[in-house]
Image (tube, rainbow, N blue to C red):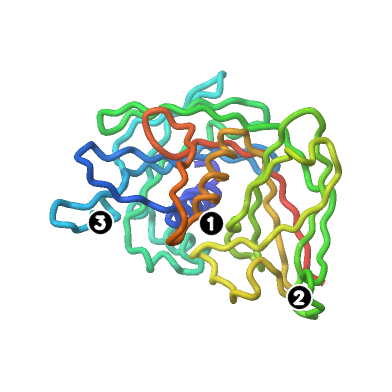
Amino acid sequence: MKNVKLILFLVIAIIFTSCEEQIFPVNDGSPPSLVVEGVIEGGEMPTPPLVLLTRSLRFTPDGRQLSLDDLFVHDAVITVNDGDQSVILTEICWDDLTEDQKELASESFGNRYDSIGVNLCIYVDINQEMLGEIGKTYTLNILADNQELSAVTTIPPHVPIDSFYFQNRTGDNSPEYFELIAKISDQPNRPDFYRFFTSTNGSFFDAPLTSVGDDLIFDGQKFEFPLSEGETWINPPPEAGDYGFFYVGDSITVKWCNLDETHFNFWSTLEFNFFNQGPFGSYTQIDSNVEGGLGVWGGYSVSYYSGVVR
């Protein structure tokens, strides 16, 4: 393995972020659907392809929900082709890691693994034979549970952040809480799709509840917009009145991403569905680019930016 720490971090990262996704139990007599969450990144810190493969959660005939260990699909044959080469992904599970690797992973995520207690598994290009490249198209093929799945994603051109600054949160002169404002120069005459994550004081990179956007209104323009602090169960949630804001003295890193349209549509419909819940809401069909299954296979072009809230 060329970089054990990088691979380990990526493996545990996608596993932990996937644990927050909504699962809709069904029991209509049909076989469980296979659910894909896969990613490959190009840009400042390119990564190999990673895929989390699970089954849709079901209830047993007596009404009991299947355990989380039953969700993970083992012994799948997963390949990724970039037009020049193909790689076969290797399955790695939590129980396969050495004690030193487990300790490193636990420390990286605030020792929160114990709150799950599941043998989490993922598929990864463990030798890093294929790293994401901007402009390339990646085809994913999966053979598992007598089913065949496929998906295609492209890592699009990157639009960097020009600059960013902190200001007192809107409508408030509080000396403690600030919002992060970013400026970009959108490229003209082409659709661009964006997503971002934040890390505060070295925490795990989290996406906020509204993490994606496009340039439908701002095509080719220079514009600025707020970037909210991310939130998942990994990082302690803020107080309701402080959601999305940063505290003076915090060290902030932004992971800024471009993604293609089908990848964007998945996260956009997922986030819209989250906000459309409640007694008067209705379920929104979540878009997927996976043929034969559910979920998403997506590429990102990525850059990173750091600063201190002052």
- Asked if residue 130 shows in the view, the reply is yes
Q: Is residue 65 left or right of residue 244?
A: left
Q: Position of residue 247 (x, y in %)?
A: 72, 74
Q: Nearer the viewer, residue 92 or 67?
A: 67
Labels 3 and 1 touching (C-beta < 8 A): no
Instruction: For marks 3 and 1, give the one nearer the viewer.
Output: 1
Between the residue at mark 3 and the residue at mark 1, the CA separation in whole angstroms equals 27 Å
Characterize the local packing of mark 2: few (<14), some (14-19) or many (20 or more) Cα atoms within 10 angstroms.
Answer: some
Labels 2 and 1 touching (C-beta < 8 A): no
Q: Nearer the viewer, residue 274 or 184?
A: 274
Q: Which residue shows up at 46% across the image and 64% down it?
A: 106
Characterize the local packing of mark 1: few (<14), some (14-19) or many (20 or more) Cα atoms within 10 angstroms.
Answer: few
Secondary structure under tag 3 reads loop
For disc 1, the marked residue is: 275
Q: Which residue shows up at 36% across the image and 53% down it?
A: 120
Q: Disc 2 marks which amino acid?
A: Val
As drawn, the residue found furthest toward the left would be 62
Instruction: For marks 2 and 1, give the one nearer the viewer.
Output: 1
Secondary structure under tag 1 reads helix
Secondary structure under tag 2 reads loop
Q: Which residue shows up at 43% across the image and 61% down it?
A: 279
Q: Disc 3 marks which amino acid?
A: Ser
For disc 3, the marked residue is: 67
Between the residue at mark 2 and the residue at mark 1, the CA separation in whole angstroms equals 29 Å
For disc 2, the marked residue is: 248
